Amino acid sequence: MTDRKSRLQQELSIIPLGWTIAAAIGFVAVQMLFWFVIPRFGGSDLPPKPWLDLIGVAGATLMAASLLLTGYVYADAKRRGMNALLWTLLVLLVPKPIGFIAYFMLRRPLLSSCPKCGGTVAADYAYCANCGFSLTPCCGGCGRAIRRDFVCCPYCGRSIATAPLAQT
């Protein structure tokens, strides 16, 4: 077998250990609630034991998944250069599906590193903020950004072979 992780495993591996432990504790706590507390103090109008166990497992799984997803939002927001504490509070305080949907719709793209200095840069940056390195090739004739696979500049018409790419 190979040691390569799937994309899902890579994404789940960013969840901090503390959130994983909290999810495990939450799972066990909800199970204990449905196994011991509710049957003892719930009265006589409880559903049958198998249904109560099923509801307990479903509730515990939902609790653990919610905590793991909150931990993922915290780590992912930090990784994307966003305010991790603010987004974590948002998904905790806003009703669950709305907070998570808002995060996943509004999150920034992943940051990458500058090939020259190694500083963090966003996907839409044309130049590195640390060293000024041009992250996208520019036409040597007009100086506008072009794609690497262009044969000629679409703005001034110069051939890329005769006008070398400007890399500052």
Image (cartoon, helix red, strand yellow):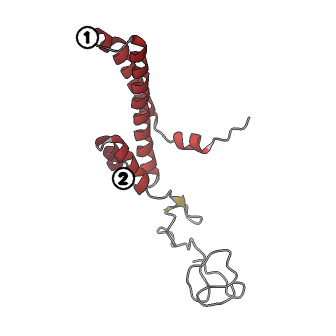
Mark 2: amino acid: Asn
**Secondary-structure class at tag 1:** loop
What residue is rendered at 39% in x and 19% in y?
31
Count the labels in the image.
2
Q: Closest to the observer: 122 or 96?
A: 96
Q: Closest to the observer: 67 or 162?
A: 67
**Secondary-structure class at tag 2:** loop
Residue 83's label in the rendered image is 2
Q: Residues within 10 Å of mark 2 (few under 14, many from 20)?
A: few
What residue is rendered at 50% in x and 42% in y?
14
Mark 1: amino acid: Gly
The Cα–Cα distance between marks 1 and 2, rounded to whole angstroms, is 46 Å
Sequence order check: which comes first, mark 1 or mark 2?
1
Q: Going by the image, does 99 lie left or right of 159?
A: left
Tell whether label 2 touches label 1 (CB within 8 Å): no
Q: Residue 35's quadrant in the figure?
A: top left
What residue is rendered at 43% in x and 22% in y?
57
Q: Residues within 10 Å of mark 1 (few under 14, many from 20)?
A: few
Can you give x and y, in whole percent of width and height, for residue 158 in the image? 66, 90
Residue 147's label in the rendered image is none
Rendered position, 66 above or below 32: below
Residue 43's label in the rendered image is 1
Rendered position, 28 above or below 118: above
Rendered position, 50 above or below 116: above
